[in-house]
Image (cartoon, grey):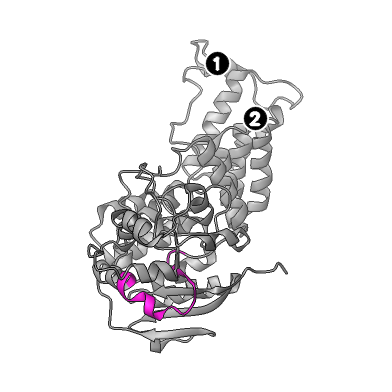
Amino acid sequence: MKSVPDLPSVTLCAIDCVNPALALRALDLCGLQCRFGEVLFISDTASRYKLDGCRMEVIPRIGSVAEYSRFVLKELGRYCRTEHLLLIQWDGYIINPESWRPEFLEYDYIGAPWGWYQDGHRIGNGGFSLRSRRLLDALLDEEIVDLDPEDDAIGRRYRTLLETKYGIRFPSDEIAEAFSYETISPKDRPFGFHGLFNMWSVLPQQELAGFVAALANSSVAGRQYIQLCKNYVELGCMEEASVMLIRRLEVVPDDSQAVKLLASLSSPQAGVPPEQPMLGRNDPCPCGSGKRYRQCCGAISEDRPATTPLPAGQIEFMLHNAMAHHHDGRLAEAEAGYRLILEHRPKNATVLQYLGVLTRQNGDPVRGEQLIRQALDIRAFIADFHIHLAQCLRFQGRLKEAQDCYRHVVAIRPDYVPADDDPGLDIRPGQQVF
């Protein structure tokens, strides 16, 4: 077994009065990946739960973001018995323990950089953050009064005061990116993450239904939840999207956006060809001759031996119709069309990857992966191919490899998944739904 990081000077902590069961799940996941000096759960319902090795602290209910911010800035310090505290949330925890760096402990505050600031004060998100004893004490300063949201208070409003008056140390962007990610696409393999909208890359498919069922209604009604729904749809993870959207509509039945997204799932899964009409023998020939198909390429029998080359126009005609079958869910007809083309064009990358998608849809992600990798050997620069490969890997439970595919897509085509500063994604420092 791989050795796990030993962090005796760090307390692992979660504070949650809304999704306590999921917060404990996050604590458990982190505790399995690193050894901490202490594990601490703070909640109004802490006495109802038990987690081996975890100290439970009961507090009055925290009912708003403002109350959470006040508690974290002004009261959290008295619960911490070590030199550092790793504060996590139900939607932010350790995912790559091997990425822990001892130098993280040289700083007083580390959180994922914020993508919407470019002024040098970008660090950072509090949902998964490392804080020192020195910082927790410094935050008791009477000048620190504008508390909400708490991470913005630390990273921006009072950062200069904390640095000059108390010598609080903040890391470089590079160190912060190695520590965690939130709204900026991850580089390499960061130690942790934060954000419900990022759960598509870390939550195993078999755990999604239980995770969604455990979420408080207020979290299901939030904007991060619908963003995660969109991400699943855009990435072709239709089963996950369906589970999430059905739960959303149970809580917010008049959500027109969720209704539209759910209706879109009645089409074949993402990754299939776009909608297009079937071509008939009297339609213009795809070869561009201006003649009808039956008078041009279609005049050549389609049942000729595979050793006899087909003209480009006939290949295009067959591909167009196979794609139309695929889009409309006629998978057997689509597969027959794709395989016929491959008899004549075995290195047609488009056909290989669509056949891979179809094979995954038919329940064989291993063979689907093989076909899509063949397509990538021919056209490695096409982002969609990498996304479809990631889907096959996800269905096999190979989440780390799927993440690598998604990261590659972000590198070659940043606009494929929601951009870092997508105006439609309402993410702000300290955002949490109570």
Quadrant of the rendered image containing residue 53: bottom right
Q: Residue furthest front?
A: 165
The residue that mark 1 highlights is 287
- Tag of residue 335: none
Residue 73 magenta-highlighted = yes
The reply to whether residue 268 is visible in this rendering is no
Residue 91 is left or right of residue 387, and the answer is left
> Quick one: label 2 or label 1, which is nearer the N terminus?
1
Dot 1 lies on which element? loop
Q: 145 and 409: which one is in front?
A: 145
- Tag of residue 348: 2
- For the C terminus, the image quarter is bottom left
The reply to whether residue 251 is visible in this rendering is yes
Q: Count the marks: how many?
A: 2
Give the mark toward the camera: 2 or 1: 2
| Residue kind at label 1, given as amino acid type | Cys
Q: 271 and 406: which one is in front?
A: 406
Dot 2 lies on which element? loop
Is 418 above or below relative to 302?
below
Picture coordinates of residue 397, whole percent (x, y): 61, 60
Quadrant of the rendered image containing residue 43: bottom left
What span is colored magenta in the figure? Answer: 72-92
Residue 420 is left or right of residue 356, and the answer is left
| Residue kind at label 2, given as amino acid type | Asn
* Picture residue at 60% right of the left edge, 55% below the top: 400
Picture coordinates of residue 141, whole percent (x, y): 29, 68
Q: Residue furthest bottom?
A: 47
* Picture residue at 58% right of the left edge, 46% below the top: 405
* Picture residue at 60% right of the left edge, 38% below the top: 353
